Amino acid sequence: MIRKLLRLINRREDEGGMHQAAILLGVFSLISQLIGLWRDRMLAHTIGPGPLLDVYYSAFRIPDFIYLSIASLASITVLMPFLIDHMNSNGKDSARKFFNDVLSGFFLLLTLVSIAVYFMMPRLAQYIAPGFSTLQLHELVGVSRIMLLSPIFMGLSNMIGTVTQLMRKFVVFSLSPIFYNLGIVFGILFLYPKYGVYGLAIGVALGALMHLLIQIPTIVKAGFTPKLAARLEHATLRQVVSLSLPRTLGLSMNSIALIVILAMASKLSSGSISIFNFSYNLETTPVGIIGISYAVASFPLLSEAFARGDMDKWQKSIISALRQIIFWSLPLSALFIVVRAQIVRVTLGSGAFSWNDTKLTAAAFALFTLGLIAQNMILVSVRAFYAAHNTKTPLIINAFCSIVIVALAYFLLHAFETVPMFRYFIESLLRVPDIPQTAVLMLPLAYSIGTLLNAWLHWVDLRRQYLTSVGSLPRTLFEAVAASFAVGITAYASLNALSYVFSMNTFFGVLMQGGIACILGTLAGLILLYLLKSESLFEILNAARKKFWKVDFVEPEK
């Protein structure tokens, strides 16, 4: 049993199987996301939206900013093309030395920055959450200081993940976020009862450490044992930083936008930050399963194709990944918007999480879902630019759209408070007219609008600079839109019919009503796609058969 498990962890995926690799990553991502939903359910049940949970979620902002602004200087998308070049030109020894030089330099930088921020945290906390009370600010400082271990561990794990992806050890790479969430769950179950919100922070740091440790045996076996270099090659570090700095600035801008948005939320009703994060985490579940899976699976292929000058394969890989993202994202968005209340109630609705919390979170979840396809497309589009060694275009687009998000959030909050007709329209549309705290809904709305703009600008520049053909993307878009209507209409009709059978006042009733509606809506979409002879559908079925059943699947004639 243990041998089989080790063989699975160290298994290398086929070079040409992007869809198969994406399916594998998607399966493990689904497991991780389910654990993440269990984590959020325990937080909602045990603590509920309020001052304490607002502190916990706000404490992530500075550590996350350090991770994005420092660790991303040596991220997978930047290091992999360098490692491939070293392997192809000078062999494995050169690649190993390059890897250890970068690892050592950025470990030192992450540690020094985290120590400096530790002492600056009392001042920074006032800017992160200007609406917090004195007690909340004191707790925010302590919790954030513990979480400063997280960017160090996650940054190192991110760099090590470059090797595991390069070697196509996607299983062990996929296990990392699972162990990260398990660490947080451990903190909720065993540390929170004894240490309060500080126990939750210890769980986050423990999860980040497990995220790192799970990958180390695999890279040691691959001949890339991590070692701190006695003498750093400054030229190597400058080369990496010069290429990755635009990307890091772009990511930092997005992180700053989230910091500003949550600072706005801290001035709203208590629990607004918690509602924002609960709904955001729900929406990022399909992003992790779809977008990240295809982005991770496609990036090694894109990097190698561009390094060899095989632009035909490079373009086909991008189009293929984008087709699958459109194919999955649009129908899922329609389904989530229709069944939003049932999803939130089943995943979060217990204990301290009230029915009003459910309705408000469901409304925010629906607004976030509007940008689901955009978030997934951005993940692949950005990696296409990075594989082509172009980090400036994503920087300009991300910086511009981050400013747009912040400006929209401020404008929409002002309009929501001062224009009664606008407020009435939003509350009636999302069915939350009798609930306080609805102003927080303007934040996910602003975020989704900015994200849609971001995806569109990335696509326009990708098309203008690199793509000579869009292949069958228009056909896939038509199929996905048609399937979305079939899924949404069927799920909505099913919910209305099932409301006479199951009660929304019990967990079983909500689960059955939402579950059956999801199944019937999905079946309607699949039947329509089958009748349309969807190329994307048969690609996925073929890849799944090869991955899990190892038999040939005959695709019908196009």
Image: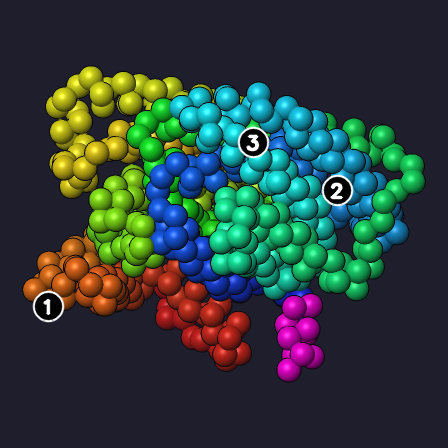
- Residue 359: quadrant of the picture: top left
User: Could you say where residue 123 lies in the image, as x and y percent from the top left?
Assistant: 57, 21
Marks 3 and 1, the one that precedes in the sequence: 3
Pointer 3 residue? 141
Sequence-wise, which precedes: disc 3 or disc 2? 2
Circle 3 — which element? helix
Tell me how far mark 1 sits from mark 2, CA to CA.
Answer: 60 Å
Left or right of 184 on screen, residue 508: left
Q: CA distance from mark 3 to mark 2?
A: 38 Å
For the N terminus, the image quarter is bottom right
Q: Which mark is residue 82?
A: 2
Task: Mark 3: give few (<14), some (14-19) or many (20+) Cα within 10 Å.
Answer: many
Q: Which residue does the image show at 16% across and 55% down from the upper left? A: 492
Residue 254 belongs to the span the image colors magenta = no
Q: Residue 537 sits in which quadrant?
A: bottom left
Q: Earlier in the sequence, mark 1 or mark 2?
A: 2
Residue 423's place in the image compared with 475, above or below, is above
Tally of numbered discs: 3
Query: For this rendering, which residue is in front, 129 or 432?
Result: 129
Measured as percent of width and height from the top left, residue 493 is found at: 12, 58
Name the amino acid type tagged 3: Val
Of marks 1 and 2, the one in the foreground = 1
Residue 165 located left or right of residue 19: right
Report how far apart the C-alphas of labels 3 and 1 lie in the structure. 50 Å
Q: Which residues are magenta?
A: 1-10
Q: Main secondary structure of the magenta part?
A: helix
Pick the residue in front: 88 or 25: 25
Quadrant assignment for the C terminus: bottom left
Q: What is the crowding at mark 1: few (fewer than 14 residues within 10 Å), some, or many (at least 20)?
A: few
Label disc, if present, on residue 501 of the rendered structure: 1
